[in-house]
Image (cartoon, rainbow, N blue to C red):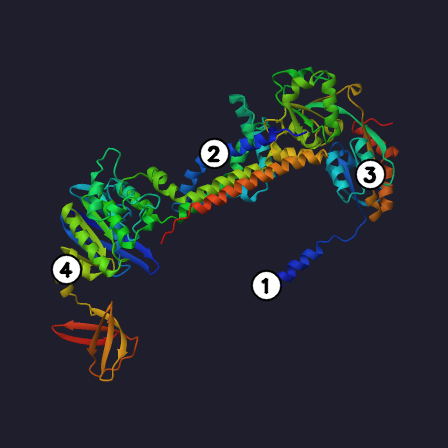
Amino acid sequence: MIDFSLQKTLSSAEGRLELDVKARLEKGQFISLYGVSGSGKTSLLRMLAGLMKPDKGAVIVNGTVWFDAAKKIDIDPQHRQIGFVFQDYALFPNMSVRENIAFGLNRNDPRHIVDELLELTGLTNLAGGKVQSLSGGQQQRVALARAIARRPSILLLDEPLSAVDNAMRVQLQGTLAEIHRRFALTTILVSHNEDEIIRLSDTVFQLEQGRFQQQAAPTEFFLNRQDAAVLTGNVVSVEANGSVVILLDNRMLRVDTAGEPFNIDDRVVLNCNNGVTTIRKL
Amino acid sequence: MMKTIFAILLLGLLSCQSPKKQQLTVAVAANMQYTIKELIAEFNKTDNTEIEVITGASGNLTQQIMGGAPFDIFVSADKQYPQELADKGFTLEAPKVYAQGQLVLWSARPGIEPQSDLQLLLNDSIKRIAIANPETAPYGHAAVSLLEKYGLYDKVQSKLVKGESITQASQFIATQNADIGFTAKAIVVSREMEGKGKWVDLNGNDYPAIEQSVALLKHAQQGNETAARKFYGFLYSPEAKAIYQKFGYLVK
Amino acid sequence: MIELAPLWLTLKLALSTTLILFVVAIPLATWFSGKKTALKVIIESIVTLPLVLPPTVIGFYLLVAFSPGNAFGKWLEHWTDIRLVFSFGGLLIASVVYSLPFMVHPVRSGLSSLPPSLKEAAYSLGKTKWQTLLKVLLPNIKPSLLTGLVLTFAHTVGEFGVVLMIGGNMPGKTRTASIAIYDEVQAFHYREANVYAVILLVLSFIILLIMYSFNGKMKQVKFY
């Protein structure tokens, strides 16, 4: 399992953020980190991977100390048994699909895992091709396969499905779940997509303003949310009888406005609670 | 703002044109670079024409003159280059010899004693011998002739380091990058090189006489011809001759 | 009279310089492309100096530094019997110093343009910094590497000022093609000068042609 307690001051264009988080993750769990952009999710992931150094704290994995600020221990990413999938995939353009996946293996390691992964991700036919010519979804699968070729115990994913269309997204979610199960991984996923969090995770951590605000199983998590911004959308058309048509993500909904005046392009918030839907301007 | 900057720059550029003063430009062979300073100082006692000096190897300067360089007078290190200029119509008068140059052997490295028989050049401790480029500098040509006469040229050829002019050759010697070398006497007796290393006169019969002549150039007609002719005449005067002798040249 | 020796010497100097710089410049460029520190800024400025300094300045300082009359030169001669002025070795050192920015800058530029996630991915897969450099980073900046190689080579071929200051015009050792041309012109041997010049011109042109046709084939990888 993973025990961590981390503090770091993060600077960004928006200003400074004090990250202060603490948690214990059980082995074999699928954990999601949820939060808005800039809440520190990616930084937290990178600190677990050893790509970013916390100011204070410790990370202990299965009894081994990966990081301890006080004792000046900081194991480099090379020696942490992790697989990392980057938001931009970070595939190596100078290598083929097969070479990318096999990159993490040492000279003496058996190669059959590469074929296994190619089959699992449906890329066997593309194995010899250059990664540049692949579609987004295919590249994502290569990144995934590459990350686990070394059979890490922990898989870290940084918004891996954000650049992919919905249909492909669902398919990749399935692949991800399959991999998590088959390789008995502990997986940490950073995402702001509720759909996929619900579908894949055992538990969700919400990161807000640098701290964990909530931790719960996904269904509970999204049901219990207090914040009013449940569904936000834009007004697409106003009808004569007082209804408006809202565009939410890629779905449209007709809502009765109880007479309140709305204009096209207004940004609105829908609150759905126990069968009652209220709408107000954002 | 930009217009102001531009205007200032333009003004600056225009004001860089030097006003027409009483000025002469004299091209001088490198071996004469220290001597010419004293000559000009002496000349300026009675004439306040400003004289600008350009130094270089005689061959280079001749090239430049043929290429249209704006020199009024050319003080060469030999007779041939001025003669060539005269033949090609670049001069106002036939060139005349003003002095005869002396070749010396000079070393700035401690422990090396230059000898006029040149045998020490064969020693292993002498690794680099500086001369001026024989193709463009008369003193370099004289040095090579001397070495050939003493039967040493083939043996020391691989040690020879050629400077672009007597100046660069002297630099190599003065900085000790060359162990020893051939230069003009006028260089080693100058105030600037006084006390630097040891030198020895070489036998004047063993190398072709370095007869140095002056060319009064056609370009002088475009500027101050009177002043040019006056300075030209001065270079053959008794006062000038005294200065040449002081710098080790032979005069008639 | 035309001898081919100056041309071979120029080629030898250019090739040696390029090879040495390829090895030396890559670690430097890698270091520079990392996090900025005060030391890095200083060293980077020093490395770039030859770009802005006239070659005669470099030549002058080398002349003084290598002189057996000065501390370093004396020490060098005493221990190794080597004198760097008037030698191919000295020219090579001068050349390496003088062309260093021409190799460092393109490589550094190339490395900086790679997304950091590329090397992070390699690290997460267990590869050391060196392995990452050799297997991932350098293969993905081939156009930059080629630019560095060609610029360095061409720049060395054209070297004149430094060679003039510390070469001593020794045939076979320091009389490079650029010096030979200068000499022939000074001696009024225009025909010979022209032959050397034309050969150098054609050589340079061919090199550039090759570089540009290669560059077309190696499309620079797009990163989003």
Q: In this view, does B170 lie to the left or right of A235?
A: right
| Residue at image location 20% in from the left, 46% down from the top | A119
Distance from disc 1 to disc 2, alpha carbons, whole Å, reads: 47 Å
Towards the viewer: B40 or C163: C163
**Res. A218 mark:** 4
Tag 1 residue: B2
Q: Circle 2: is it few (<14), some (14-19), or many (20+) Cα within 10 Å? A: some
Q: Where is residue C102 in the image (x, y as percent from the top left)?
A: 50, 42
Which residue is nearer to you in this view: B192 or A280? A280
Foreground residue among A138 and A282: A138
Which comes sooner in the sequence, label 3 or label 1? 1
Q: What residue type is labelled 3?
A: Lys
Asked if residue B161 lies left or right of residue B116, the reply is left
| Element type where label 4 sits in the image | helix
In three-dimensional space, the C-alpha distance between marks 3 and 1, rounded to whole angstroms, equals 51 Å
Write down the chain letter for disc 3: B
Mark 2 to mark 3 CA distance (whole Å): 50 Å
Instruction: Say which residue label 2 marks.
Output: C19
Q: Are marks 3 and 1 in contact (CB under 8 Å)?
A: no
| Amino acid found under the numbered disc labelled 1 | Met
Which amino acid type is marked by label 4?
A: Pro
